[in-house]
Image (cartoon, grey):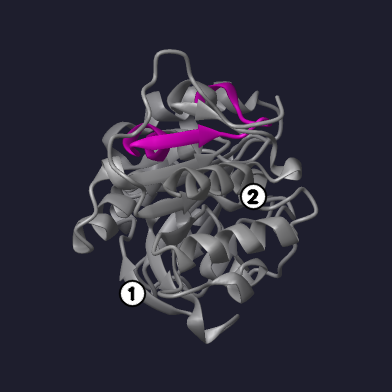
Amino acid sequence: MTSATRQHGTPAAALPARLIATDLDGTLLRDDKSVSARTVAALAAAEEAGIEVFFVTGRPARWMDVVSDHVHGHGLAICGNGAAVVDLHGGPGAHRFVKVRELARKNALAAVRLLREAAPGTVFAVEQTYGFHQEPDYPKLHMEIPDAVLPAEELLAPDGPAAGQPVLKILAYHPSLDPDAFLTLARLTVGGHANVTRSSPSALLELSGPGVSKASTLALCCAERGISHEEVVAFGDMPNDVEMLTWAGQSYAMGNAHPDAIAAASGRTVANNDDGVAVVIEQLLADRG
């Protein structure tokens, strides 16, 4: 595939795009975590044409330095799979939280208990607005030093080290389960206590508050701007993008996308390493004349 295509039978959007919502890892970013010159130019051209660009990612705010130099206009990003809306203008370490949709501690504790019972060997980490904590056996997946290392039940206790800030999400890792099988099991097990998804190639799940997803937070941001879902173009590659790809008026799964993302999107583009987001943006702008 050398260009962007719509899935068979999917009509072009009736309304012109007013907002582009793009995932980062595996989508906008190349595998080396860089943003290509072509993509930088496409994002700037979209903003110049009056189309807002939102970065919508599972990443925490402190990992947004990869795109902080490429924010134009409003400079807002949706982080933590919808758990936070962040103003990136301050640069790394100085991000301002505009909106927080936290995971209640009682829900987090219930999810931890249920997953321990359903999938023995699961280990957990706790992601907060400014902090990261993990259990002793949680692997070094994130290349950072945790603020505290304790069992999840202690981390989430009312007087625990994570008590001072909202919990954005819980990370649950299993050393041997198939990633998709773990996701299915967790969704059946956790029920209404949390929204469960994944974005990693490993068996690493991300648990947010009930109803919190990239799509639901993006919908809130769009409503505040008077933008309908038909006016949104979305890009993604993993299960945590599925709701957003389904919700947007136009959506594109990357050439490297997970099957669930492909099924959810209305179109396909080339892989992240081939600047698939830029390919679509360039075509959108050309179609506008």
Residue 247 lies in the magenta-colored region: yes
Q: Which mark is residue 223?
A: none
Q: Can you give x and y, in whole percent of width and height, for residue 84 in the image? A: 39, 64
Q: Of label 1 and label 2, which has the lower sequence position?
A: 2
Which stretch did the figure color magenta?
Answer: 243-260
Looking at the image, which is closer to me, 261 or 103? 261
- Amino acid on which the number 2 mark rests in the picture: Asp
- Foreground of the two, 186 or 226: 226
In-front residue for pair 267/122 = 267
**Above or below for 286 versus 242:** below
Residue under numbered circle 1: 98
Q: How far apart are the two marked residues, 1 and 2, measured between alpha carbons?
A: 23 Å
- Residue 25, numbered circle: 2
Asked whether residue 147 appears in the rendered view, the answer is no
* Residue 85 in picture, x, y percent from top left: 38, 66
Crowd class of label 1 (few under 14; some 14 to 19; many from 20; radius 10 Å): few
- Kindly indicate whether the residue at mark 2 contacts the one at mark 1 (C-beta within 8 angstroms): no
Q: Does the magenta portion include 34? A: no
Element marked by disc 2: helix
Q: Residue furthest top?
A: 9
Q: Is residue 184 above or below residue 152?
A: above
Q: Quadrant of the N terminus?
A: top right
* Dot 1: element: strand
**Neighbour tally class for label 2: few under 14, some 14-19, many 20 plus, Cα within 10 Å:** many
At a point 47% along the width and 23% down the height, the residue shown is 184
Please count the marks in the image. Answer: 2
